[in-house]
Amino acid sequence: MEDKSMDMKTTEENKLEQAALEESAAAETRGTIDAEQAAAQPTEAEIPPITKKDVNRLFFRWYVRAEMSNSFERLQSLSFCSSMVPALKKLYPDKEKRAEALKRNLQFFNTEGIFGSAIHGTVLAMEEQKARGEDIPDDMITNIKTGLMGPMAGIGDTLTWGIIRPILLGLAASFAMQGSVLGILFPFAFVVITYIIGNYICNMGYRLGRDSVKQLLQGGLVNDVIYGAGIVGMFMMGALAASYVDISTPLQFAINGEEMVVQDMLDEIVKGLLPLGFVMGSYFFLKKFPYKILWLLLIIVAICLLGSLAGVL
């Protein structure tokens, strides 16, 4: 009986020893695999740097797709994330970290496409810092985007769509009315000019990082540019109004036998006073009723018809 008991103990000890050896071998194998996988992944120091080509590619993708995927829920978020994809692939070789970065850049986004590209450069710089191990929380990147969307949209809407576009289209209309083929070139010039401006601002956002927009807003340059461009824009609108708004009055009357022509009297006061009055009247109407363009057109047509029938215009 004692011999059987000893044999059973020996057998159990052998099984436990064998299990321990197998577990140790498995752990060693897992450690080897983990080490190989870790060696296969680039370290923070080995992550390739973002180049100017990467930033230019980012902006090109954004410029082409900015308004393609608007949705009521997140507006331009898909376009923003799509523009960041090549750079994020470069910064995050690990699929899990890349997926986290993609989700981070799929949050709500909406701004003006040209001057708003400074946000893309800023976010790219922060993503690169995060990929290299710097302590940048996800919320910081999201908050930077959210905080800059409004200011950059205000600047971009003023300069791009309120000044640059009207000036170029006004010049295009001027050449077209003269029968010049050069008029067709100005819409394409708008694309080229805005692309160059946006690409420069995107690269500036990347170079300066989180301080880019702060320097842009606090430096006073933007205000000077807006003020100067506004003066040029008003000058162009005045010139176009004087050249192409043709309104005059045939009224005339006699005083002491001398014939007085009303149009000549108005021209002596201010040349083109009636066209200027119509333009300024239209401006104040649209300022008071911003979305009543059709009503403005109907009022102008009515004034012209009634004035012509009455012999006033």
Image: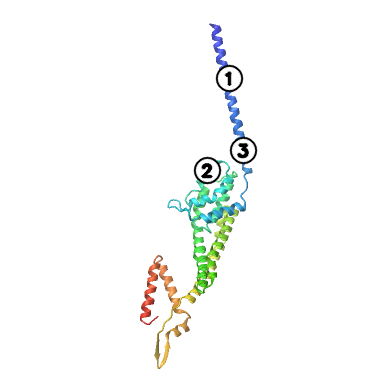
**Residue 78: horizontal and vertical position, in percent?**
49, 50
Q: Give the alpha-carbon distance from disc 2 to disc 3, as whole Å.
A: 19 Å
Residue 62 horizontal side relative to residue 252, left or right: right
In what element is the residue under mark 1?
helix
Q: Amino acid at mark 3?
A: Ala
Q: CA distance from mark 1 to mark 2?
A: 42 Å
Vertical relation: 145 (above or below) 273: above
Q: Position of residue 155 (x, y in %)?
A: 51, 61
Above/below status of 198 relative to 300: above
- Residue drawn at 60 percent across, 32 percent down: 33
Q: Quadrant of the C terminus?
A: bottom left
> Residue 54, how many percent across, how many down?
60, 51
Q: Earlier in the sequence, mark 1 or mark 2?
A: 1
Is the residue under label 2 in contact with that under label 1 (CB below 8 Å)? no
Which residue was labeled with disc 1?
A: 18
Q: Quadrant of residue 135?
A: top right
Q: Helix, strand or loop at disc 3? A: helix
Placement of 24 over or under 260, stated as above or below: above
Q: Which residue is mark 3?
A: 40
Residue 99 - label: 2
Q: Residue 220, can we see it?
A: no
